[in-house]
């Protein structure tokens, strides 16, 4: 049977644009139909923005690749109408174990907090993830949404201008050109668009190779993340075992810098490694293997004129911590509503500067965490290795050493502290977790979950959340109508801990991406209007 | 926030110094290095204050 990643899911079809006398003008063109490009296209199309996705391939990701998806991206995907099949198919996990040599030295439980719609993490092969996104694209298109996905359309050149970008595209039927108001490059770490523009992508190279073997096997291992430092089967290096759906197991061996790639990838050599790890009588089928190296780096700015970068094209991290696809989806979540407000004239083009500010903040956080994990996993000096081993030694019997163990700090949602869109916190003693810039914490409300009711599905919707506080039934300012949601701590008790703190009531202004823009103890129309102006890049 | 103590603070200095030397008795260089690392981590946790640790690291670096 063919694997899903061997079937063209969006086969090439000739477009009317190809025969046009003049290049046809589009609103937004997205380059790259990976998780980030498809996520952005769905978000824009749901909001009524005409969007065209180009990809030089016509299939979903080859091999499992990104497998670990965190709660925040699942919440974003729920707004995009894609999370349900992912959670249904995905493997939920909470427990991680860390081994040093032959001993278990540490165990962690993600201990998901009560009252959230989504689990802390699921594991799911990237090809399934993309398949569900493609299905959602097709569903939107069938219902008349302005979205199109063109396979085997390879971008070959771009000419940026002040208010548009001209694209040259190669297809099986030859070349054609089109123009677009905005171009979003979601074309991965090797971004051809970034190269065409000659933009820098600098950072740190890590001199190490990792071998991924995704194997199908009937195994007794529990659904946990197992990480080894210096195990007998991979001396001086690390290894990882993690479960995916369909009895596929992700096995990741650190193999060092000076290796012969071709030799390492020979099935007999992978087989030798697997048997050393899992036993001589192992029965398995190798689904996919790959050797990767990584860098931690980012662009200096995430947009230049009408060309915007999102996901790995803008920033790259090591895989430890599940911060790649997860942060890419937070990029698109941040970008889509801003682009829509700029396109319809509600917000100034300068609103896009806040995309840079907020997502560079996110990328810097991810690069910091990811670099630290990498330094722990691959110590860069003898002294660094001595300390690393001392931490692992102590961790086995002494709890105090366990916070130093770093086999990957798992992706947490980014709080946009210091963002130009935030209004300074006006809620004294409000919970720090809901300060301006934070993503809203979920909680059960009558009839479902709070996040089901927040955020812009079909329009960039700002909302006012009035908790145990008086507020009008609707509010409008600066060309934006805000929905007012009244919530009572009697009906939704967790709101006290997550939004009120010791305040007796609170009013929150929530952005279309479910981040907090401002909060106050009571409703004040002038203050809310000013915060709204600030949140769409119109100061005061 | 506390500052690193850089005045005399250890009673029975000779005894304490001897404890430090004695604990390495009979260990190879790698074993001693590992012990020192465990010791630093343990004391660092005891101090707990990142600012004091920062000052101590700066002092040691010279």
Image (cartoon, grey):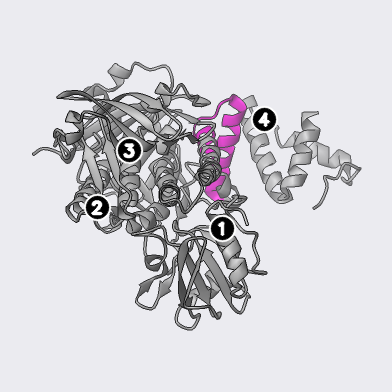
In which chain is the residue bearing label 3? A
Pointer 1 with pointer 2, Cβ within 8 A? no
> Residue A495's spot in the image, x, y percent?
50, 73
Mark 3 sits on what residue? A29
Q: Please report the bounds of the magenta region as a residue range.
A: A372-397
**Number of numbered discs on residues:** 4
Crowdedness of circle 4 by 10 Å Cα count: few (<14), some, many (20+)?
Answer: few
Q: Secondary structure at mark 3?
A: strand
Q: How far, Cα to Cα, is label 1 from label 2?
A: 29 Å
Tell me, yes or no, if residue A190 can be seen here: no
> Can the viewer see residue A380?
yes
Circles 4, 2 touching at the beta carbon (< 8 Å): no
The front one of A516 and A460 is A460
Q: Which residue is mark 1?
A: A533
Asked whether the beta carbons under mark 1 and mark 3 sit within 8 Å of each other, the answer is no
Q: Disc 2 designates what residue?
A: A145
Q: Main secondary structure of the magenta part?
A: helix
> Is label 1 or label 4 in front?
1
Q: Chain of mark 4?
A: B
Q: CA distance from mark 4 to mark 3?
A: 70 Å
Reading the chain from its start, which is encountered first: label 2 or label 3? 3
Residue sitting at x 56%, y 43%: A357
Circle 1 packing at 10 Å, graded few (<14), some (14-19), many (20+), is some
- Quarter of the image where the N terminus of chain A is located: top left
**Chain holding disc 2:** A
Badge 3: few (under 14), some or many (20 or more) residues near its Cα, within 10 Å?
many
Which quadrant holds residue A83?
Answer: bottom left
Structural crowding at the residue carrying mark 2, measured as other residues with C-alpha within 10 Å and reported as few (<14), some (14–19) or many (≥20): many
Q: Which residue is mark 4?
A: B26
Circle 1/circle 4 CB separation < 8 Å: no
């Amino acid at each position: 049977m063919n694997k899903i990643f061997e079937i063209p899911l969006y086969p090439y079809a000739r477009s009317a644009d190809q025969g046009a006398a003049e290049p046809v003008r589009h609103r937004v063109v997205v380059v790259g139909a990976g998780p980030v490009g498809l996520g952005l296209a769905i978000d824009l199309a749901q909001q009524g923005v005409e969007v065209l996705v180009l990809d030089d391939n016509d299939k979903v990701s080859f091999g499992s690749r990104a497998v670990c998806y965190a709660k925040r991206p699942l919440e974003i995907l729920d707004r995009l109408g894609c999370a349900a099949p992912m959670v249904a198919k995905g493997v939920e996990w909470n427990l991680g174990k860390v081994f040093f040599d032959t001993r278990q030295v540490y165990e962690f439980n993600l201990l998901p907090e009560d009252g959230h719609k989504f689990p802390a993490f699921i594991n799911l092969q990237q090809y399934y993830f993309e398949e569900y996104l493609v299905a959602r694209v097709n569903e939107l298109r069938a219902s008349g949404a302005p979205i199109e996905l063109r396979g085997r359309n390879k971008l070959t050149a771009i000419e940026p201008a002040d208010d548009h970008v001209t694209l040259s595209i190669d297809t099986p039927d030859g070349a054609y050109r089109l123009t677009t108001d905005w171009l979003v490059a979601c074309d991965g770490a090797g971004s051809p668009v970034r190269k065409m523009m000659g933009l820098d992508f600098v950072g740190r190279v890590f001199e190490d190779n990792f071998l991924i073997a995704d194997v199908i096997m009937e195994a007794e291992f529990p659904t946990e993340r197992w990480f080894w430092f210096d195990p007998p089967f991979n001396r001086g290096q690390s290894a990882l075992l993690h479960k995916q759906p369909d009895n596929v197991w992700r096995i990741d061996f650190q193999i060092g810098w000076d290796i012969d790639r071709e030799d390492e990838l020979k099935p007999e050599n992978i087989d030798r490694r697997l048997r050393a790890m899992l036993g001589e009588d192992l029965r398995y089928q190798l689904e996919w293997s790959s050797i990767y190296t990584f860098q931690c780096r980012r662009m200096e700015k995430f947009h230049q004129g009408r060309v915007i970068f999102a996901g790995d094209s803008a920033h790259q991290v090591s895989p430890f911590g599940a911060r790649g696809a997860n942060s890419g989806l937070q990029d698109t979540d941040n970008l889509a509503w801003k682009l829509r407000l700029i396109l319809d004239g509600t917000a100034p083009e300068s609103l896009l500067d806040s995309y840079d500010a907020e997502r560079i903040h996110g990328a810097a956080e991810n690069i910091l965490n990811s670099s630290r994990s990498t330094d722990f996993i691959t110590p860069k000096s003898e002294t660094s290795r001595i300390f690393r081993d001392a931490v692992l030694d102590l961790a086995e019997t002494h709890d105090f050493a366990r916070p130093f163990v770093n086999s990957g700090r798992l992706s947490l949602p980014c709080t946009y502290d210091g963002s130009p869109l935030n209004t300074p916190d006006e809620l004294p003693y409000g919970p720090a977790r809901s300060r301006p810039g934070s993503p809203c914490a979920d909680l059960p409300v009558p009839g479902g979950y709070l996040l089901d009711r927040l955020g812009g599905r079909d329009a960039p919707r700002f909302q006012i959340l009035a908790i145990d506080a008086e507020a009008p039934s609707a509010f409008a300012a600066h060309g934006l109508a805000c929905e007012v949601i009244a919530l009572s701590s009697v009906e939704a008790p967790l709101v006290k801990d997550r939004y009120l703190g010791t305040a007796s009531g609170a009013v929150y202004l929530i952005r279309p991406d479910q981040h907090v823009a401002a909060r106050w103890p009571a409703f004040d129309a002038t203050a809310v209007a000013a915060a709204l102006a600030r949140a769409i890049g119109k100061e005061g | 926030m506390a500052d690193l103590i850089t005045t005399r603070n250890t009673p029975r200095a000779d005894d304490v110094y001897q404890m430090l030397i004695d604990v390495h008795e009979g260990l190879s260089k790698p074993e001693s290095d590992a012990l020192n690392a465990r010791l630093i981590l343990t004391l660092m946790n005891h101090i707990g204050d990142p600012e004091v640790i920062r000052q101590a690291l700066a002092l040691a670096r010279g």
